[in-house]
């Protein structure tokens, strides 16, 4: 019995030691933040050269479905709790973003499992730039996307005119992670206050807003993480001037931070700042270690890396299913080019040649011109051109315009822009007047032609290019595009096509008269009647 008593005493001592160690271990906590920023509608894989990493040759990168696969793998491999966040600007520049006013982007984010997102300056541009003057419509489009989201949107320096948060957009949220009360707070770019789309809303200085909100959040949380959309320079200013922030996950400046930028905060603690570049070609993996001293939690260290979204990643099926109804209408093959160009410059020029050919042929102008690559977000990368390729190159609803210019004026424009591509150049005569077709954005911007000189304003340039490709470059033996043949490189299951309910209300009227079982998006609203095939309706200026 004496021996048994000793053994029991030893066991009790061991248990006490283990309990003490466990209690000591409870004073430490770890969490991982997976993050993206500045996705800008790049839902499909695309050609990208990461020049900040020394790459000069474009390769297939990104894509929402591949990114989701990578995120799920990172979650599974993490030894600590994870949270997935986006630091703003999911909108604009993407083929599907502008067509569906953000609905496709949020569908992909919901399927991926995002847990919060910051309002970026481009979130105020949910509608096409051509609709910027319709500020009420743009605001309604943003709030419609917010309602569709299965995660909260954050912005502490955005309110209505009475200083109240907008519906569904909060200054901060609190999440319990790894036993910590973690407060996530966001601020957006101050230049948004000057946008037409934010009329009637208030966007204040982000640093001053943080001075107000960070102490409030800190008072009820153990840790404060700022998920911002103000750019790397302002992020550093935020870290040095506002106490109480443990770490910053940034966006807006499209900065590839391959390791954290450490900045000393007002209290003397160092604050790490991270950002994952642009377009979702990377996912940031931000591992944070916290410890509690004298009852106060503080950051003890951080490990960070950017994980590339590469072409060898399989597509996540949940995201594929979510995007299917939005993508399928864009797979229609429009035409086959004789050549697409062998390098980036040649591809940009060939895409511009198709653009000016279409402008001249479909408007009946004498000439058409455009500087090589100007006004294009992307280029035609292969000979086979689908509607998606067209909308990726020209995501904005620019109009065809015709200006009356003398041959001498055209020559001066060519001299100022020697890379200009001109359709009908053989007709040039300095003493003649010519009806010259252009994109409105390029005419007023690059060429500096005053809008009062536009004789005519016609259809969406994309409608003209689509018609031109279908009439001149359509192959009789062309087969319907298949998913496995596409640059998208996804194998998609059959799925119900997009319905009118999936489209923005502002576009539903375009399709309300019926049509194909798999409707094209609302911005493809050209009426392909026999009459419209023979004459391009234009709105003549008075």
Image (cartoon, rainbow, N blue to C red):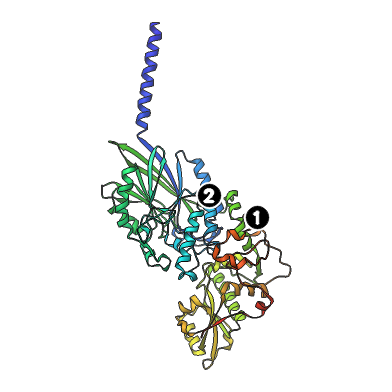
Q: Seen in the image, is 99 located left or right of residue 268? A: right
- Along the line of sight, the residue nearer the viewer: 232 or 109: 109
- Along the line of sight, the residue nearer the viewer: 85 or 366: 85
The residue positioned farthest toward the left in the image shown: 267
Residue 271 image position (x, y, % from top left) = 32, 49
Picture residue at 27% right of the left edge, 36% below the top: 294
Q: Seen in the image, is 272 located left or right of residue 513? A: left
Instruction: Establish if 293 lies above or below 310.
Output: above
Q: Seen in the image, is 223 located left or right of residue 334? A: left
The answer for how far apart the CA atoms under marks 1 and 2 are is 20 Å
Q: Secondary structure at mark 1?
A: loop
Residue 496, disc: 1
Q: Which residue is mark 2?
A: 112
The residue positioned farthest toward the right in the image shown: 477
Picture residue at 49% right of the left edge, 54% below the top: 147
Q: Mark 2 and mark 1 in contact (Cβ < 8 Å)?
A: no
């Amino acid at each position: 019995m004496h021996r048994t008593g000793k053994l029991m005493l030893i066991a009790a001592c061991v248990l006490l030691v283990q309990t003490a160690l466990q209690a000591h271990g409870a004073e430490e906590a770890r969490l991982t933040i997976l993050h993206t920023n500045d996705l800008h509608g790049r839902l499909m894989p695309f050609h990208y050269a990461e020049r900040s990493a020394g790459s000069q040759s474009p390769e297939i990168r990104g894509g929402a479905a591949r990114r989701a696969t990578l995120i799920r793998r990172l979650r599974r491999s993490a030894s600590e709790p994870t949270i997935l966040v986006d630091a703003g600007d999911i909108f604009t520049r993407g083929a599907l973003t502008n067509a569906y006013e953000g609905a496709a982007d949020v569908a992909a984010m919901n399927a991926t499992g995002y847990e919060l997102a910051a309002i970026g300056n481009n979130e105020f541009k949910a509608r096409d730039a051509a609709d910027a003057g319709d500020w009420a419509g743009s605001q309604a489009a943003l709030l419609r996307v917010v309602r569709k989201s299965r995660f909260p949107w954050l912005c502490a320096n955005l309110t209505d005119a009475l200083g109240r948060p907008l519906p569904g957009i909060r200054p901060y949220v609190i999440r319990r992670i790894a036993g910590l009360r973690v407060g996530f707070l966001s601020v957006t770019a101050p230049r948004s206050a000057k946008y037409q789309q934010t009329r009637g809303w208030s966007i204040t200085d982000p640093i001053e807003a943080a001075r107000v909100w960070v102490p409030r959040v800190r008072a009820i949380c153990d840790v404060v993480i700022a998920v911002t959309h103000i750019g790397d320079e302002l992020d550093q200013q935020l870290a040095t001037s506002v106490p109480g922030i443990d770490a910053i996950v940034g966006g807006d400046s499209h900065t590839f931070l391959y390791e954290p930028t450490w900045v000393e905060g007002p209290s003397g603690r160092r604050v790490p700042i991270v950002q994952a570049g642009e377009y979702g070609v990377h996912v940031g993996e931000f591992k944070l270690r916290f410890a509690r001293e004298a009852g106060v939690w503080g950051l003890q260290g951080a490990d960070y890396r950017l994980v590339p979204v590469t072409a060898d990643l399989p597509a996540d099926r949940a995201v594929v299913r979510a995007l299917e109804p939005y993508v399928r209408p864009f797979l229609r093959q429009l035409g086959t080019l004789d050549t697409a160009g062998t390098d980036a410059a040649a591809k940009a020029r060939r895409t511009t040649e198709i653009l000016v050919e279409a402008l001249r042929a479909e408007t009946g102008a004498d000439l058409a011109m455009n500087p090589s690559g100007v006004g294009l977000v992307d280029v035609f990368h292969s000979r086979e051109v689908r509607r998606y390729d067209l909308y990726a190159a020209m995501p904005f609803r620019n109009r065809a315009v015709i200006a009356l210019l003398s041959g001498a004026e055209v020559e001066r424009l060519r001299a100022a822009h020697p890379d200009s591509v001109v359709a009908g150049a053989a007709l040039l005569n300095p003493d003649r007047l010519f009806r010259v077709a252009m994109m409105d954005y390029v005419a007023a911007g690059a060429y500096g032609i005053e809008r009062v000189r536009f004789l005519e304003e016609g259809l969406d340039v994309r409608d003209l290019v689509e018609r031109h490709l279908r009439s001149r470059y359509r192959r009789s033996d062309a087969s319907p595009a298949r998913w496995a043949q596409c640059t998208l490189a996804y194998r998609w299951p059959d799925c119900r096509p997009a319905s009118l309910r999936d489209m923005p209300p502002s576009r539903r009227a375009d399709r309300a008269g019926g049509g194909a079982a798999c409707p094209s998006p609302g911005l493809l609203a050209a009426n392909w009647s026999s009459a419209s095939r023979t004459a391009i309706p234009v709105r003549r200026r008075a």
